[in-house]
Amino acid sequence: MFPNLRLSGALLLSHNLNHSACRTMTSVAPPVFKPFTLTLIQLGSIASDKAANLHHARKMIMKAAKSNSDKRPQVVVLPESFNSPYGFVHFPAYAENISYTAGKEYDIQASVSESVKMLSFAAKEAGIWLIGGSIPERDVETNNIYNTCTVYSPTGVKFPKTLSNHSGPMITRFSFPCAVQHGI
């Protein structure tokens, strides 16, 4: 379907989304796709030390961005729950306050989220689009825990987030030099 799409990196994992959730309106013109290189990172060893997990993720982002292959990736994708052990029982202890308000520019410098800051700075340093896997997030108003995906431009700007409480697939669309749709 995408003959110019080249995947580099480790393991490709797929997510079975409800097909009806992925339909587009028929009155909308189809998107124009441009070829791009995508690197998917599978971190492997996620431990209970959040700082070590963030350091390892950053190191792997930089390694992926400086790929020895003939084409440097424009997009790098981290796995789900890259900063904490996976499992709902772990999320409350690792949850971060991201505090994104829809329609407002996100102030990375003022953010209290260690993961958001690391991802933003890594995207900017590497000059890549970075899809930050997911981060356990605590909503400060409701105290609910979400599995949140954040996206960063090559300048480190954070794009809208996708929240999931695992009650079903969540779809967010965002545009960059190549159209991407992701779901959690």
Image (spheres, rainbow, N blue to C red):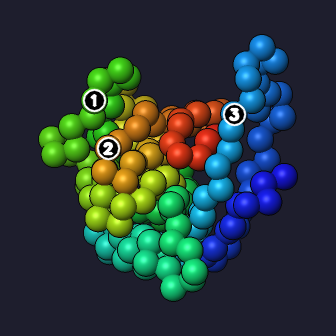
**Disc 1/disc 2 C-alpha distance (Å):** 9 Å
Give the mark, 1 or 2, whose residue is nearer the N terminus: 1
Quick check: 126 above or below 24?
A: below
Residue situated in front as seen by the camera: 178 or 182: 178
Helix, strand or loop at label 1? It is loop
Quick check: 171 above or below 24?
A: below
Per the image, the residue denoted by label 1 is: 105
Helix, strand or loop at label 2? It is loop
**Disc 3/disc 2 C-alpha distance (Å):** 23 Å
At x 43%, y 33%, the residue is 160
Mark yes or no: residue 97 visible.
Answer: yes
Image spot of residue 3 (x, y percent): 79, 60
At x 53%, y 50%, the residue is 88
Identity of the amino acid at label 3?
Pro
Mark yes or no: residue 47 visible.
Answer: no
Residue situated in front as seen by the camera: 86 or 36: 36
**Disc 3/disc 1 C-alpha distance (Å):** 26 Å
Identity of the amino acid at label 2?
Val
Crowd rating for badge 2 (residues with CA inside 10 Å; few <14, some 14–19, many 20+): some
At x 31%, y 50%, the residue is 156
> Relative to residue 53, is residue 23 drawn left or right?
right
Per the image, the residue denoted by label 2 is: 157
Per the image, the residue denoted by label 3 is: 31
